[in-house]
Image: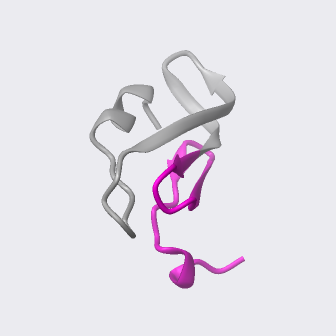
Amino acid sequence: MRKDLVDILACPVCKSPLELTIEEEAGEEVVRGKLTCNQCSEDYPIEDRIPNLLPPEMRTA
């Protein structure tokens, strides 16, 4: 996921802005990390450069 995309993403649950936490990056791309909503305290994982923005009840582990 490109780092600058966090500016246009919103929490799918409450529509609040998301905060980016980077665990692994390659240039301007986030390879692994998470997006966090400070309003409703949900985390959305980023794996292999792809953010999983499905609401928590729709994700499978």
Rendered view: 23 above or below 53: above
Residue at the extreme left of the image, as rendered: 8
Q: Is residue 55 magenta?
A: yes
Depth check: 57 or 32 in front? 57
- The stretch of residues the image draws in magenta is 35-61
Q: Residue at x 72, y 76 (%)?
A: 61
Say left or right for 54 vs 10: right
Q: Please, which colouring scheme is shown?
A: one colour
Picture quarter containing residue 45?
Answer: bottom right
Say left or right for 38 vs 47: left
Residue 39 screen position, x and y as percent = 46, 55
Say left or right for 18 vs 46: left
Q: Residue at x 62, y 46 (%)?
A: 48
Q: Is residue 52 magenta?
A: yes
Picture quarter containing residue 24?
Answer: top right
Residue 54 screen position, x and y as percent = 46, 70
Rendered view: 57 above or below 37: below
Rendered view: 56 above or below 24: below
Q: Residue at x 53, y 36 (%)?
A: 20
Q: Residue at x 57, y 59 (%)?
A: 41
Depth check: 10 or 40 in front? 40
Say left or right for 32 vs 29: right
Residue 26 screen position, x and y as percent = 61, 21
